[in-house]
Image: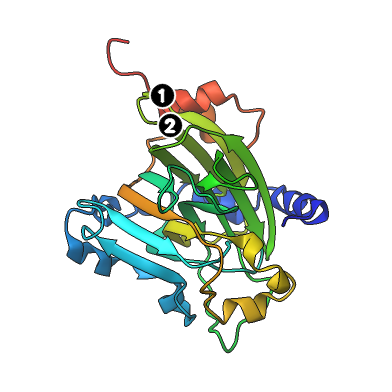
Amino acid sequence: MHSKTTIRLALMLAAMPLAAGAQQMRRPAEPLPDIAPLSDDFNDPASLAAWTSHAAAEGWPEMLAKVDVGRTVPGSLYLEPHTSGWYADFRAPFLFRTVAGDFDVVTRLRAAGKSTPVPTVTWSLAGLMAREPRSTTMETWAPRGENWVFATTGAAARPGVPVLETKTTVNGRSALNLHPVKEGWIELRMVRIGPDFLILYREDGERAWTLQERFFRPDLPQTLQVGVNAYTGWDAMPELWDDPAAYNRQVLTGRAADLALTVDYVRFARPREIPAALARRRLSDYRVAATDLLAWLDPAPSGD
């Protein structure tokens, strides 16, 4: 699914030097509006209308087999994708809110199979995604235009084995990493500070966050689509792996697909104020200690 050459190329592109514009974005001239109102605990079925589908926004066929709030699972967003994949120039289901500037977004979700705790079909995952909007339509689409980062959970190359997948895509070239996690509910978190994206997670019952991944993306614009993505069954469409244009323009039904996503909430906030010791650092640089970042992002409760 993912060639070594493609992965190396995307990593090289993602390591571009810090652009002046990206540095300036850390210090906006005016305070940005509160984004907490974008949050959704999915207690009201009508809240689904506040989310924008990537397919509807850019004129593609909808690859969601099922989506609702509160009907399938009370108090939750529930969705099932058709056979699909968020990889390179390939698209899949994505529900988003539009966010300008820095953000700290958290979701609690469970990416299961339709009748099993973990999907039984390869590359069946869902999670948080931040994507550059595109002005193209299905008719005007061209390759090498996808730019995004995400963190998803579910099953990857081994059906039934839960993982956390982190992926960055630069001009339609994707690089990913996989990390083992427990099955069941999990919280995923993405923090943007200018060109730096930090990916965290914590499994149910844990108090502390784990800082899993850092992406340096000075190419991404200030305004992004941020929300929940999902995909399943990449290995069920090998004849289309070299033809994203044909894949993107159709809905694949009757093929291997096994993802039942339940989302408890998605909560948006502006990041905490950056400590002076970190303010001039590239936060995605691994020379910045994870302990320092977590002390900022995940401070111990008073009295600890």
Tell me if residue 72 comes above or below residue 140 in the rendering: above
Residue 20 location (% of width, % of height)? 63, 53
In the picture as drawn, the residue positioned furthest to the right comes out as: 5
Task: Give the residue at x 20% y 51%.
Answer: 75
Quadrant assignment, res 233: bottom right
Spot the residue most to the bottom: 139
User: In this picture, is 75 found above or below 66?
Assistant: above
Foreground pick, 116 / 278? 116
Residue 261 percent across, percent down from the top left? 39, 53
Q: Can residue 145 be seen at all in this image of the molecule? A: yes
User: Which residue is pictured at 27% across the width and 50% down the height?
Assistant: 36
Alpha-carbon neighbours of circle 1 within 10 Å: few (<14), some, or many (≥20)? Answer: few
- Circle 2 crowding by C-alpha within 10 Å: few under 14, some 14–19, many from 20: some
Whether tag 2 and tag 1 are in contact, CB under 8 A, the answer is yes
**In the image, what residue type sits under mark 2?**
Arg
Pick whichever, 93 or 289, lies toward us. Answer: 93
Residue linked to disc 1: 208
Q: Quadrant of the N terminus?
A: bottom right
Q: Residue at x 42, y 31 (%)?
A: 203
Tell me the amino acid under the disc marked 1: Ala
Give the label, 2 or 1, closer to the camera.
Answer: 2
Q: Quadrant of residue 91?
A: bottom right
Which quadrant holds the C terminus?
A: top left
| Residue pointed to by mark 2 | 202
Question: Along the line of sight, which residue is nearer the eye, 116 or 224?
Answer: 116
Image position of 211 with respect to 49: above or below: above
Residue 39, image x, y percentages: 27, 52
